[in-house]
Image (tube, grey):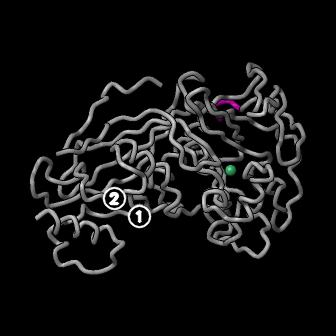
Amino acid sequence: MAAHARDYQWVNGNSRIDFWVSGETTSDPVMGPAYFNSRFDMDDVSAGQNARLTICLRVCLAEVGPWTKTVTDRDGRPFLQWPQVLDYWTNSWKPLAHWPDKVFDLFRTWVEQQATSFWGNKDSSWGNSGFWLFCTRPDWQGLDWPRGGNRPTHRLYVNCDFECIRAAGDGDAHVLIHCAYLNPKVPPPPAPACAPVGSPPSNGPKICAFVNPGRASRTGTGLLTFETIAPRDVPCLPNIKLTRPITGYCVPHEIGHAIGLPHIGVLERRPDCLMRVEKGDNGSCLECMTGGTEADANNIMGYGHKTTLINALPWAVRAAEHTHTNPSDWMIGLGQRAPLDLNHLRQFTGNPQAPAARMREYRESNK
Ligand SMILES: [Zn+2]
């Protein structure tokens, strides 16, 4: 996790942007910090091309087999002891098998692809339309275009991107995720119409998957099984309808934890969830998984696959670190935008909260 070789800055007027940041970033105080790298790309920017902020997460997916030493969770409790794994759904040990020939390599590639395509906003199947960031601070010139000019014509947005990077081993990774192959001779649980919450879904992961983010002091730990690459079926949620017949996009959900996103009820500060957390729940209770609303339940950090502005927090907080600004200086949006045409703003009148209007104030006061 050494600092990147291209550890330099872009400077524009009184503003600077660091190319590379490596360290802990806290998106949510309950979740705590997550350790990851990020890269702020300005090489190709122009009046038609935005900047790009890429979170680079170093992941070691470790094949579980007889060589695997006993692994303990954050509470010091063993959850992996070949040839068995602890299932947190049922608090019971399940038998493991050797990965079939070549299957682990395929699995590892699928996991990396799912993580990168979802959080890199290239996920046509699940329709994550992408996040953009925009710095609304009038006195900050880091993303004004052209650089070095007194009268910039554009201010650039920042497109959010993600790369899952294959780490060589434990010491080289932000998160070490143990990948277990369950003994197929274990009969699957009977298939109900929908699976009761808190029990293994009938057609998906047979045991609980989890990932804890890495810290400066230790590598994060997680567990995935072969079944986690396939979306699982619908859990029974009281009074809440999930928008797709299948849900629980497991790999992006777990990678979301690795970059510091807690469950959606925690993230959205839902009172019922926070009350449970205050009483000692770790943020995985039903109230925190669904937030008590349909939109929350369908979020990638709930039981679903959708994204809202709040899922972009790791990028927004990290953008502030790259640019030496405050997270509150940044607006988040969904989708893609062309760089903001500052001349066009002269005709703009409208919502004073919009970044365009803030920029108009800036233009007027700097004439
Ligand atoms: Zn989770």
Determine the main secondary structure of the stretch shown in magenta.
loop
Q: Position of residue 5 (x, y in %)?
A: 33, 24
Q: Is residue 114 above or below residue 216?
A: below
Which quarter of the rendering shows the C terminus?
bottom left
Q: Is residue 188 left or right of residue 344?
A: right
Which amino acid, mark 2? Phe
Q: Position of residue 64 (x, y in %)?
A: 72, 28
Mark 1 or 2: in front is 2
Residue at the disc numbered 2 = 134
Q: Real-space Cα distance between discs 1 and 2?
A: 8 Å
Q: Position of residue 279 (x, y in %)?
A: 80, 53
Q: Please tell me which of labels 1 and 2 falls first in the chain.
A: 2
Residue 25's place in the image compared with 6, above or below, is: below
Q: Quadrant of residue 104?
A: top right
**Amino acid at the residue labelled 1:** Gly
How far across and down, in percent of the image, does residue 348 sit?
22, 77
Q: Quadrant of residue 318?
A: top left
Depth check: give the residue in front, 281 or 101: 281
Tag 2 secondary structure:
strand
* Residue occupying image coordinates x 40% and y 35%: 21
Pointer 1 with pointer 2, Cβ within 8 A: yes
Determine the residue positioned at 29% across, 50% down.
Answer: 51
**Callout 2: few (<14), some (14-19), or many (20+) C-alpha neighbours within 10 Å?**
many
Examine the structure image and report whether residue 270 is included in the region drawn in magenta. Answer: no
Tell me the residue at 74%/65% (across/down): 272
Q: Which residue is mark 1?
A: 333
Magenta stretch, residue numbers: 100-104
Q: Left or right: where does residue 277 sit relative to residue 315?
A: right
> 317 and 222: which one is in front?
317
